[in-house]
Amino acid sequence: QVQLMESGGGSVQTGGSLGLSCAASRYTFEIFTMAWFRQAPGKEREGVAGMGRGGITTYAESVKGRFTISRDIYKNTLNLRLQLITLNTEDTAIYYCAGSAGSLASLSVGSCKDWGQGTQVTVSS
């Protein structure tokens, strides 16, 4: 089973930037798609950005132009990253890294079988 561990969350002011990382240990090519989701208090978990095995990416409309997903592989560990810029208070949430054996086109909360524990991002005005 793949283990995912996020890091890099924190507190910033409106307009600030953060970088999130997710280390996927025991990475295998059974994971075709990796993604970042977030969940704000009282709201459902939502997709933020995803990347398929071929490197194609997708973003939620609310973060396009502000968030960038990327990945690299080092010593059999896949590192999934999310660069967040021009943050606003609506970006405050717990951010989760997730892996799916399905395609990028079918990415959803339900399609992901591997999840990290989450990292808190807080944006204050």
Image: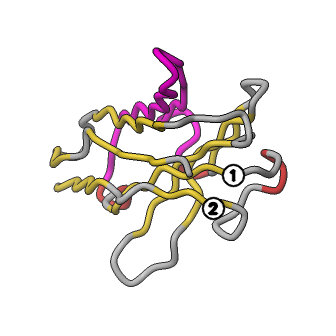
Report whether 110 appears left or right of 95. Answer: right
Q: Residue furthest top?
A: 74
**Few, some or many C-alpha atoms within 10 Å of disc 1 (few <14, some 14-19, many ≥20)?**
many
Q: Position of residue 74 (x, y in %)?
A: 47, 15
Residue hosting label 1: 100
Q: Position of residue 91 (x, y in %)?
A: 37, 56
Helix or strand or loop: what does disc 2 sit on?
strand
Q: Residue at left 51%, top 77%?
A: 44
Report whether 48 appears left or right of 52. Answer: left
Helix or strand or loop: what does disc 1 sit on?
strand
* Residue 38 location, quadrant: bottom left
Q: Residue at left 45%, top 31%?
A: 81
The region drawn magenta spans: 63-88
The quarter of the picture where the C terminus appears is bottom left
Residue hosting label 2: 113
* Residue 92 location, quadrant: bottom left
